[in-house]
Amino acid sequence: MPITPSDASRQVRAICALAPIVPVLVLHDAADARPLAEALIAGGLPALEVTLRTPAALDAIRAMAAVPGGHVGAGTLLTPGDVRAAKAAGAVFGVSPGATPALLAACEAEGLPLLPGAATASEAMALLERGYDMLKFFPAEASGGAPALSALGGPLPQIGFCPTGGINAANAAEYLRLPNVVCAGGSWIAPGELINAGAWDRIEALARAASTLGAPRPAS
């Protein structure tokens, strides 16, 4: 069923508000998907972004979609074909590094709530004009970090953000203190070496620590 941009942002904002951190996941083996999702959810991070950067990504989304308590999204959406494949695999939201008219139209037609990326005031204003008020700030650190995102909040207080790109355990709290930040995205919770080792207990511990970085709340 098609979705409007405002409804898409409302749904994505609700998912982002579930926890302060959304793990950004790169999976090379779909067999790791279910135990990884179980560890992250048990650690208090129910919103999961699986990036479409590997051949295993869509199968990983299918496996994670079956884990109770999780909200699995597809990241690195670039084309309408990506959108259709992600929706068919069971993704309940999408994430893109930027936004194009074709990508936005595909997500709206497929009924896949999108967290579109923006790095400048002009990009954010264009998305707001279309009806999106929950955006990904990317690449966060390379685009000026928390000070830049704070500055965007002055003229655009109605937009909530999920900063991603260079976010880690050391700087996440700086972003989460901003009134226009709903959550942050990061890959440090599930690094490749721990996934490859099947160190689910260590990943759960990292998730539990990340879940305490800030109280999840909608942006004002």
Image (spheres, helix red, strand yellow):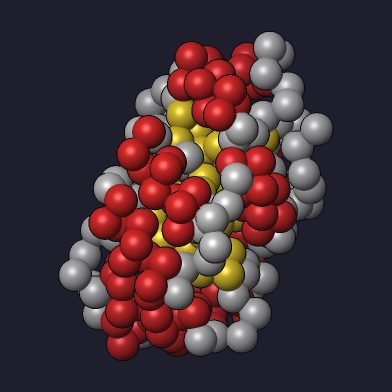
Q: How many marks are shown on the rendered structure? A: 0
Q: Nearer the viewer, residue 30 or 90?
A: 90
* Quadrant holding the N terminus: bottom right
* Quadrant holding the C terminus: top right
Q: Residue at x 34, y 62 (%)?
A: 84
Q: Position of residue 9 (x, y in %)?
A: 63, 44
Left of 114 or right of it: where is 190? Answer: left
Q: Residue at x 38, y 33 (%)?
A: 101
User: Looking at the picture, does residue 131 appear above or below residue 39?
Assistant: above
Left of 36 or right of it: where is 210? Answer: right
Q: Nearer the viewer, residue 166 or 138?
A: 138
Residue 195 in sight: no
Q: Residue at x 42, y 67 (%)?
A: 87
Q: Position of residue 113 (x, y in %)?
A: 54, 53
Residue 103 in sight: yes
User: Looking at the picture, does residue 88 appear above or below residue 115?
Assistant: below
Left of 76 or right of it: where is 159? Answer: right
Q: Nearer the viewer, residue 60 or 129?
A: 129
Q: Residue at x 77, y 44 (%)?
A: 218
Q: Position of residue 83 (x, y in %)?
A: 36, 57
User: Looking at the picture, does residue 133 appear above or below residue 31?
Assistant: above
Q: In which quarter of the view is residue 19 placed?
A: bottom right
Q: Position of residue 114 (x, y in %)?
A: 51, 49
